[in-house]
Amino acid sequence: MSINARHRLPFLPGNSFRDLTKSAYHRSQTLSYRNGFALPRPPTVGIGQDPLVSEQLEYNYDNELSSETVALFYPGTSSRATTLPEFIPAHVALDKKVLRFHGFFRERVLHSPDEAQRVRPVFIYYHLEDDSVCVMEPLVENSGLQQGKLVKRQRLSKNARGDPYHWKNLNLATDLPVFGVEFLESEGILVNDPEPMPVDQYTSSRTQPQRSFVSPSDFDHQRRFLTLDRMVLRFFALWDNTDTDYGETRAVTIQYYLVDDTVEIREVHRANSGRDPVPVLMRRLRLPKTIREDSEPFPRCVLEVSPQEVTEYYSPKDFRLGETLRLMGRAMRLYDCDGFTRSYYQSNHPELEQKPVELPKKEEVAQEREFPPYNGFGSLEDSLQNCLSLIPQPPKKDVIKMLENDHKVLRYIARLGRHFILSYYLASNMISIFEKASRNSGFAAGKFLEKTRVPKPAFEADKPQFYSPADLAIGATVVVFGHRFVLTDADLYVLRYLESESDQIPNPTLESLRNRLGVHPEQRPTTATHLPEEEEEKGRTQQPAKY
């Protein structure tokens, strides 16, 4: 029976007293800080204060385990202690205490010509808390077996009666290494010497030997990359290919990369050369200079030369201006280099003087482009577009001229046995002809010619010249596709416009208009026009139609 330590009374209902002088009811602190680390305080028992059970177990854990002697488990031995210590449950004393053993088991393999049995390693975990055992198989890459937990955590029977295994029954056999030897030896059990696990023949046959890499040299490639990256020696050369059918001398560029001693050859393309625009003539690679004698007769067109067959590669010392190099069976004559290449040789190889070689200049005869003769289909500008590009484009128009002269029309009266109105459109330099209605003439009035550019008859069809306002004078004859029209009169607007452009209009044209309209340069006429108003309005509003 528990006794109240303060009042010496049995701890029964009615015998407990409340301390009336107590003023602090907070929970006592169980940790103290030393050097910045939180450590549990040692248990102290004061007046009216009981020790914590967890603190006792924490600080007396080692002493309690050491007080258990072998006599507790083996009754025939003598004991140093006459009284049993205070009882500590197993889940407290042996919590998280696990014995780990390494083991293996043999598995028979049937119907396999490669192996008769298989050795499979395992880990055996013995939990001292409840005498349970767990068996795990480690994962082996590409084993083809379902590995992992073979036996879940449980108490295993050691005999037919169902008695479970105890840690006293475990020991190292001749083939089991173990961790946890200190626990068994502390309990007086002699642990046998471990023995290596047998080798599985099938698994060892599948094991590949570890690869070994041998560095070819002690050169610091990283330092070379950091110092020589993007430094390229560029040479200009001529590829002499005249010994082949339809061969010629072609310009190429040879680029030597200092970072890895590789060479690249690029072809310089010319406009209208007729060749495909392939930029690289030889891809970037280490160019062999000297090959072993036993590899010379081997056909190189079948297989490239391997590094084992090359005794020497091209280096910057092998490139000199003025010399002809044989690169991959092609004759390359170096004649010039860029500024960086010249400065590199001056600083690193001063004994090699790089002087450019002057090449004979070829006189290129400028050939004039000759266009085929005009076939008469469509306009001359439309037919010319077929000669300028593979896909014909519409002829370009003078947009500024069209915007400035929009709705500006010069109108004349023409005579061809009958009376016509000839309209000249300044925006497009086209001419349209409209026939006036005449009573009892026997001809229907209407459009005689739709809007089109009218060429002069004195010029060829391939190089025509078209009528302009300077050619349209009063009394002049305008030949329109074989029809001869004589201009007899014009609008007053025609005279005003031509006077504004007098620097481009000849004087006979202006004088013919002034004489016909009765206007002198110093006079400003007030009359509008000699054409009837009805005919003038009709000619402006009439729309062009297909001719």
Image (tube, grey):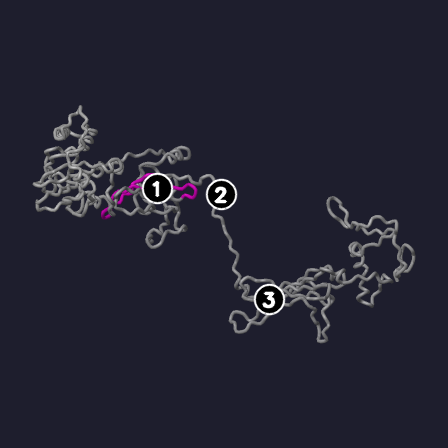
Instruction: Answer above or below: position of 338 versus 71.
Output: above
Verify CB contact (< 8 Å) between mark 1 and mark 2: no
In the rendered structure, the answer to whether residue 487 lies left or right of residue 305 reads left
* Residue with the mark numbered 2: 222
Estimate the spatial distance between the alpha carbons at disc 3 and disc 1, rounded to whole Å: 63 Å
Q: Secondary structure at mark 3?
A: strand
Instruction: Name the spot of residue 329 as percent of width and height, x first.
Output: 31, 47
Instruction: Name the spot of residue 387 as percent of width and height, x first.
Output: 21, 44
Q: Which mark is residue 254?
A: 1
Residue 259 location, quadrant: top left
* Residue with the mark numbered 3: 120
Estimate the spatial distance between the alpha carbons at disc 2 and disc 3, rounded to whole Å: 46 Å
Around disc 3, counting alpha carbons within 10 Å, would you say few (fewer than 14), some (14 to 19), or many (20 or more)?
some
Residue name at image x 18 percent, y 23 percent: 522
Residue name at image x 73 percent, y 46 percent: 37
Q: Amino acid at mark 1?
A: Ile
Residue name at image x 52 percent, y 69 percent: 114
Return the disc, 2 or 3, that comes first in the chain's sequence. 3
Residue 409 location, quadrant: top left
Q: Give the position of the N terminus as an image quadrant.
A: bottom right
Q: Secondary structure at mark 1?
A: strand
Residue name at image x 10 percent, y 44 percent: 439
Instruction: Name the spot of residue 194 as percent of width and height, x first.
Output: 67, 62
Is 383 magenta? The answer is no
Instruction: Name the spot of residue 254 as percent of width and height, x first.
Output: 35, 41
Q: Amino acid at mark 3?
A: Arg
Q: Amino acid at mark 2?
A: Gln
